[in-house]
Image: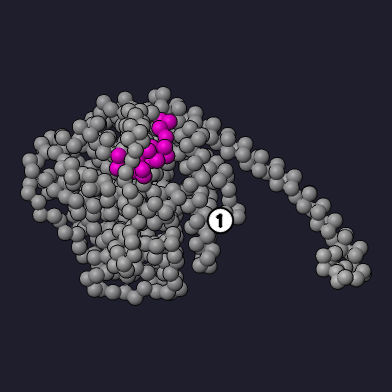
């Protein structure tokens, strides 16, 4: 694929000392694989088949429902075409405002290549400007009381009951920018890595803008919540005494960008609609690859690390990618089995760079799906939001006569049964192993909340079942009474309503 990113030509500042960026990632990248091109087929063949889908493995089956890596479409690699589906073309730039039919003709002109490099969000904004439509720009003006309360909340940013929804309101929808900037400064990373504050602020603003506010779940507030959870894990004794400043920088950046430009639909949806991203990444970790490349694009566009030696900058981009790719839920069993093996053999050595990187991957995976481990008031809101996004995708699939994805049919699923299944087959196994690795008060708190939340959803399910069972006999009695009344009055002439009788 042709690389259309233009690196900014900027004066070189003083480079970060070599020892700060001396470590190398745990995941190797083939020199034949372009950073912005298609994945190396040899790497793909090695990654495929990592998950067993034996029918007896209920955990694997549940993960498969969330996002199946085995679904393969027999299409050629044509990254210049957005969609070759013969009947359907869904434009994710306007997914939540309108749905378009008809195929988009392939174009090799320079305009399409430039537009393809923009995120879905910014493409929509640029299209609005070109059409003369006003761009909806929020007013970032806050009362001093609100900013003061936000600062007070940041003093307790390391607590597990941190209310990200309240913090987002207090910052007028800028929770991701405010939180990430605060944490980078708190760790002294801005000074240590000699980051230009203007470039950093521009990068964070662009990151927040590229999250789709129309997504009920995968939006900037979710990214801020994951970043806050990642910070909590970085504070755990096992990590705090072992991680380098470079590790912490990578972890925070990966958390902030891990779902960048998420379209609000899952990978199987992109595959069955023959979306160009599915073809570009050969149906493998489609969304995660897109999040990574989008983040790298913003790093290069803002020149945030342009003052570093080229080798260090590229290495940072690659390791950022390996962290984001670890959040692919369809590879859950792969990472969990490796984690369990390390713990069983007691061979994790955090003085080893590759082991530290693996623990960062596991920490990000935990942060990404930690909603069931939050206090009920927060966890319930997240559960409702993610289910709303599932059902929204199901509605789109029904509208376009597509097979409805598992967990996405609002008529056969509920928030409760989805959450209970997710906790049982995905969250509980992961956080149980994390507690083995880091047996702290936080780990026990998370497991405790998850147990209580699971019981709460179970109780709500029982109440709903009881109500529906009580309603069924009553409805049957009403139907029988109506039928009997109709039969009794069937031979009589139809009466004229009293108000309609002629005098």
- Highlighted range, magenta: 160-178
x then y, percent, for residue 236: 33, 27
x then y, percent, for residue 291: 32, 52
Identify which residue is drawn at 42% across, 37% down.
166
Mark 1: few/some/many CA within 10 Å (<14, 14-19, 20+): some
Which quadrant of the view contains residue 112?
bottom left
Q: Does residue 11 lie above or below 100 as drawn?
A: above
Q: Which residue is mark 1?
A: 409
* Residue 418 appears left or right of 106: right
Which quadrant of the view contains residue 271?
bottom left
Identify which residue is drawn at 92% across, 69% down.
492
Picture colour scheme: one colour
* Residue 474 appears left or right of 139: right
User: Could you tell me if residue 33 is visible in this image?
Assistant: no
Q: Is 189 part of what is drawn in magenta?
A: no
Identify which residue is drawn at 48% across, 38% down.
379
Label total for image: 1
Give the quadrant of the C terminus.
Answer: bottom right
Q: Is 171 part of what is drawn in magenta?
A: yes
User: Could you tell me if residue 105 is visible in this image?
Assistant: yes
Identify which residue is drawn at 57% across, 43% down.
416
x then y, percent, for residue 83: 37, 69
Helix, strand or loop status at disc 1 = loop
* Residue 395 appears left or right of 147: right
* Residue 185 appears left or right of 264: left
In this view, the residue in front, 223 or 106, is 223
x then y, percent, for residue 190: 18, 37
Give the quadrant of the N terminus.
Answer: bottom left
């Amino acid at each position: 694929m042709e690389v259309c990113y233009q690196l900014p030509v900027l004066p070189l500042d003083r480079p970060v000392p070599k020892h700060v960026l001396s470590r190398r990632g745990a995941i190797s990248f083939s020199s034949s694989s372009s950073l912005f091109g298609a994945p190396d087929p040899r790497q793909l063949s090695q990654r495929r088949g990592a998950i067993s889908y034996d029918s007896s493995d209920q955990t694997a089956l549940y993960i498969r429902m969330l996002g199946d890596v085995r679904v393969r479409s027999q299409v050629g690699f044509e990254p210049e075409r957005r969609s070759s589906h013969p009947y359907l073309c869904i434009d994710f730039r306007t997914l939540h405002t309108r749905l378009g039919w008809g195929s988009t003709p392939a174009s090799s002109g320079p305009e399409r290549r430039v537009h393809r490099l923009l995120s879905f969000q910014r493409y929509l904004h640029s299209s609005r400007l070109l059409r003369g439509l006003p761009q909806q720009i929020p007013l970032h003006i806050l009362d001093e009381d609100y900013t003061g309360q936000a600062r007070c909340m940041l003093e307790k940013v390391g607590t597990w009951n941190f209310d990200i929804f309240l913090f987002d309101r207090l910052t007028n929808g800028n929770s991701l920018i405010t939180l990430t900037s605060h944490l980078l400064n708190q760790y002294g990373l801005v000074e240590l890595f000699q980051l230009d504050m203007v470039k950093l602020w521009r990068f964070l603003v662009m990151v927040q803008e590229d999250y789709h506010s129309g997504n009920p779940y995968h939006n900037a507030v979710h990214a801020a919540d994951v970043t806050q959870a990642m910070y909590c894990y970085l504070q755990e004794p096992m990590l705090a005494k072992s991680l380098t400043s470079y590790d912490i920088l990578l972890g925070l950046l990966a958390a902030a960008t891990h779902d960048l430009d998420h379209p609000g639909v899952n990978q199987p949806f992109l595959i069955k609609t023959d979306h160009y991203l599915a073809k570009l990444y050969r149906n493998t970790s489609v969304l995660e690859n897109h999040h990574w490349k989008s983040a790298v694009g913003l790093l290069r566009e803002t020149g945030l690390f342009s003052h570093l030696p080229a080798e260090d900058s590229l290495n940072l981009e690659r390791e950022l990618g390996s962290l984001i790719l670890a959040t692919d839920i369809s590879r859950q069993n792969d990472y969990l089995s490796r984690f369990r093996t390390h713990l069983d053999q007691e061979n994790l050595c955090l003085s080893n760079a590759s082991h530290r990187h693996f623990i960062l991957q596991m920490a990000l995976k935990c942060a990404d799906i930690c909603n069931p481990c939050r206090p009920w008031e927060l966890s319930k809101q997240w559960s409702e939001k993610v289910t709303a996004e599932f059902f929204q995708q199901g509605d789109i699939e029904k509208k376009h006569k597509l097979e409805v994805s598992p967990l996405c049919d609002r008529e056969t699923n509920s928030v409760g049964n989805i959450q209970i299944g997710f906790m049982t087959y995905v969250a509980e196994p992961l956080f149980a192993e994390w507690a083995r690795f880091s047996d702290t008060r936080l780990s026990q708190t998370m497991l405790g909340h998850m147990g209580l939340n699971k019981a709460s959803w179970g109780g709500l399910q029982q109440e709903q079942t009881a109500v529906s069972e009580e309603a069924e006999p009553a409805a049957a009695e009403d139907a029988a009474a109506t039928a009997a009344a109709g039969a009794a009055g069937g031979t009589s002439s139809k009466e004229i309503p009293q108000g309609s009788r002629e005098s």
